[in-house]
Amino acid sequence: MEVLQRDPECSRPEACSVLESVSAAVAGKPLCCPNHEGKVMEFYCESCETAMCLDCTEGEHREHVTVPLRDVVEQHKAALKTQLDAIHSRLPQLTAAIELVSEISRQLNDRKNEAVAEITSTFEELERALHQRKSALITDLESICSAKQKVLQAQLSSLLQGKEHIQSSCSFTEQALSHGSATEVLLVQKQMSERVTALARHDFPERPHQNAHLDCQVETEGLRRSIQNLGVLLTTAAVAHTSVATGEGLRHAATGQHHTVTVTTKDKDGELVRTGNAVLKAEITSVDGSRAAETEVTDNKNGTYEVGYTLRSEGEYSFALLLYGQPIRSSPFRLRAVKPSDVPQSPDDVKRRVKSPSGTGGHIRQKAVRRPSSMYSTTKKKENPIEDELIYRVGSRGRERGEFTNLQGISASSNGRVVVADSNNQCIQVFSNDGQFKMRFGVRGRSPGQLQRPTGVTVDMNGDIVVADYDNRWVSIFSSDGKFKNKIGAGRLMGPKGVAVDKNGHIITVDNKACCVFIFQSNGKLVTKFGGRGTSERQFAEKLGPNLNKSGSVFSPHFVAVNNKNEIIVTDFHNHSVKVYSADGEFLFKFGSHGEGNGQFNAPTGVAVDSNGNIIVADWGNSRIQVFDSTGSFLSYINTSADPLYGPQGLALTSDGHVAVADSGNHCFKVYRYLQ
């Protein structure tokens, strides 16, 4: 600023030299070298990115590559020109964006002003209605009061008149008796006697003809509550470019059939918007631009919307989904309608067939129609990728609340909580079903009540949190608010990983190191144990190797789940299979083999069972989640393609029927919508 203001006070030599260079450049004169007086800068050092004179090239820059300044200037001018063109081409986009954002800002102001006017007029109208009611009540009050007063006044006047008559008769008679002569008394006796007798017999209205009851009762409590809650401001933070649509109905439709797609609204950061009321419009148009079908939008009031439509004729259509007038991600979609007879079988149809028992009692094994994007999938991106069923994700790598380092087990409680074993942070974190952080507990250590390496977690029928602590070699039980209650299995367990609770309240623990399953009562008494190292059906594989861990081996059984028949389902990591046992440890059946195909595994980890008995398995090495029926027949994948998993571990079903998975490689957990 000193240079540009040509400040005569400027005493800094570097400022003066810059000033000279600027002046020289403006005048088109050759630049003088600041290090060698009188020498012109004609060369350029590429490694130092600076101009210099001949003396400089022989001095400090003699080892460097130097080229004539004029050549470099041309190169730099050309490079700058290219860069300039590149950024210049962004100006129209920015102009359009500025116009759009300004327009939204203007609309927002207009809407605010309209809403203010609306609120003002509504409340003025209410004030008028209140004043009218006030006047009506007062008028009614006056009329009731005056009617009662009329009756009371008539009674009063009658009573006063009677009193006056009696008093005047009394005084007249008394006077006559006291002062009158005998003749006068005899003259008035008859008249006075009649009058006194008449007054004595007269029936005066002595009892009140009316009462003074006149209360005003105004019940204001309900109204006050209504007024406090009067008026709702509707808005959302949803924006189109992050919001997504899911469902087969985006791409394919059968004519004459009703189809729905789900739109999930998100904010500018891609976080799920959890309130409804967004302005969503759907348009299905033919190639010629005419409207092809009526669409109806249902607001689920939780940030998701169902868009339904029915197409009457076959052909190609454009399906546009507009949020506040802007196209949502990947909109418009290319929609193709075919006759119902030409529709390929969907995984859901397959699933329904598998679930319905056939006449012979057997199950039809089917291949799924769609493969998910996984670690091993082709890197070629599909045109129009199908958006996945992700509802939300929580977390990133770190040590703060809501952050994780190598999370392992995950569980969900019946009262709408998701509990996560944050293994390397040596704590348990608890969230609500919609991903809001609730609390965390756990102190690092090897004493009872402390955590060294929590790997498995479950919630029992009382809401207590049961934690398998791998390095402490026991299972800790905490109350729902994180207070330590008890530890079990100490002295018996070598490395507990997965943990589950059955219908009898027994705690089932997978001992990963001992390759067996322990069943304890809640007080820690051992009920039974089964399994061992090996590859047979009652055993779990142990993989030996020099560099796998400190002890030289990786142990196999990982996680466990219990179905509604109290059967125990265990993932056998190195046998690439899932094994099912009866409640007392008798082997029933197993499913799975090594591979990437439908129903195959590359080291299965987390496992959960839904209310229909379907078994959901985290396929760790293939970074995907597979769904099987209760007999182990493959049904489908949970589509995780938009935000791929990396080494999923624990799995759980939330109380609202979604699948929660501990995505340990991405240090977060994710919750997916899933068709039961």
Image: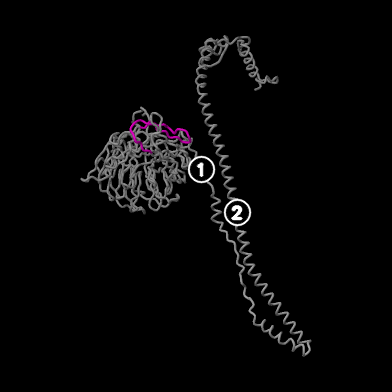
Q: Is residue 593 above or below residue 483?
A: above
Q: Which mark is residue 234?
A: 1
Label 2 crowding class (10 Å Cα cut-off): few <14, some 14-19, many 20+?
few
Q: Is residue 436 left or right of residue 214?
A: left
Q: Nearer the viewer, residue 5 or 424?
A: 5
Quadrant the C terminus occupies: top left
The quadrant of the rendering that contains the N terminus is top right
Name the disc covering residue 132, or none. Answer: 2
Dot 1 falls on a residue whose secondary structure is loop
The amino acid type, in three-letter code, at marker 2 is: Gln
Q: Bounds of the magenta span?
A: 309-335
Residue 632 lies in quadrant: top left
- Which amino acid, mark 1? Leu
Q: Is residue 521 magenta?
A: no
Compared with residue 192, is residue 107 higher up or lower down, i.e. above or below? Answer: above
Q: Earlier in the sequence, mark 2 or mark 1?
A: 2
Estimate the x, y position of residue 387 in percent, counting from the top left.
39, 35
Residue 274 placement (x, y as % from top left):
46, 42
Residue 570: image location, x then y, percent: 31, 44
